[in-house]
Amino acid sequence: MKYLVTGAAGFIGSSVAHKLCEAGHEVVGIDNINSYYDPGLKLARLELLSPLGGFKFIKVDLSEKEAIARIFSEHKFERVIHLGAQAGVRYSIDNPHAYIDSNINGHLNILEGCRNNGIEHLVYASSSSVYGTSNSTPYKTSSAVDHPISLYAATKRSNELMAHTYSHLFDIPVTGLRFFTVYGPWGRPDMAPFKFTKAVMEGKAIEVYNNGNLSRDFTYIDDIVESILRIQNVVPQKDKFTMSSPDVSTAPFKTYNIGNGSPVSLTRFIEAIESATGIKAIKKFLPMQAGDVFTTHADTRELFNAIDYQPKVSIEEGISRFVGWYIDYYGKK
């Protein structure tokens, strides 16, 4: 099949593109390779893809309406895996326009491309941040998502509403994935596994928010990619309207949580890094940060039932693999 993968130079996007190519599919990857974090890392990910048969990279910004329309028209994709976005919760506080350009206008351009080119399935990235400060855990896709606490979260919720509208109006099969904390080799430098490992290995203090009383639903990259590849083969079907459930959408549209389903405390997470590096962490305790939440915990049963797959990599094993990659890539001894 022929796929469009957006965010192909990103952490998750590059891994998805790699697996699709290995399976014999044709993949066009797009990315703007911006400077939100080290572009060199993004280019290094693309270097891993360039030798693979069937991969083509196009540098383009999602907000470039005509360019995105032209890519859709020229390449005649069958499926789209839309992972490109301006990431980061804290960054959105000081750089709001970047999120509107990429996450709103860019998402609209992808939806228009799907609408006008007969795409048989769009899978796109949402985020666990849509749950805001909800204390009702584990988060279910039916939980309230009306109170985002960052602009990033607001754009991701907007993506869900926009995607549903297009699915309803134009019968586009659409699946949204609310990602929880993804980590592993080639991971983002702005995420805790990377930042903490770097600080520990350099003998610097790690910033521990809310005195360490936080937990995250960490999910290893291989488990995430396997879940994405399986769910893109589960194409949503349009439901018939019935008076018995008038408040249920009839569009070919589904939303899933995609995560581990088992939160890890910040303490255990730090201990895993200490064990993998053999270095005791220096901790600098700080108050809760604006836009942060105390815990993330995904109710993933619906996704796992749909794809017959459960995450397999523990936080200790995953962090060990990440630290091994970090040492190899950055040459730290």
Image: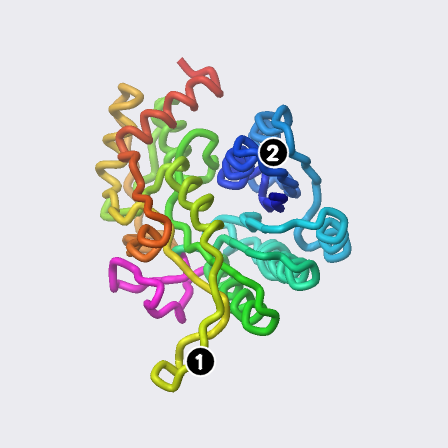
In the picture as drawn, the residue positioned furthest to the top comes out as: 333
Comparing 102 with 1, the one in front is 1
Q: Is residue 149 magenta?
A: yes
The residue at which mark 2 appears reads as 39
Comparing 330 with 186, the one in front is 186
Q: Quadrant of the C terminus?
A: top left
The residue at which mark 1 appears reads as 241
x, y percentage for residue 318?
A: 33, 31
Q: Quadrant of the N terminus?
A: top right
Q: In percent of the image, x 61 and y 45: which residue is there?
A: 3
x, y percentage for residue 286?
A: 31, 45
In the picture as drawn, the residue positioned furthest to the bottom comes out as: 243
Q: Secondary structure at mark 2?
A: helix
Classified by dominant secondary structure, the portion drawn in magenta counts as loop
- Magenta segment range? 129-150
Residue 220 falls in image quadrant:
top left
Query: Would you call the spot at circle 1 few (<14 residues within 10 Å), some (14-19), or many (20 or more)?
Result: few
- From mark 1 to mark 2, how far is it between C-alphas? 48 Å
The answer to whether one can see residue 38 in this image is: no
Q: In percent of the image, x 68 and y 35: which residue is there?
A: 56
Q: Nearer the viewer, mark 1 or mark 2?
A: 1
x, y percentage for residue 212?
A: 24, 44
N-terminal label among 1 and 2: 2
Q: In percent of the image, x 55 and y 71: which residue is there?
A: 165
Which residue type does callout 2 highlight?
Answer: Pro
Residue 37, labelled with which disc?
none
Q: Is residue 126 above or below residue 184?
A: below
The answer to whether one can see residue 59 in this image is: yes
Q: Is residue 259 above or below residue 319?
A: below
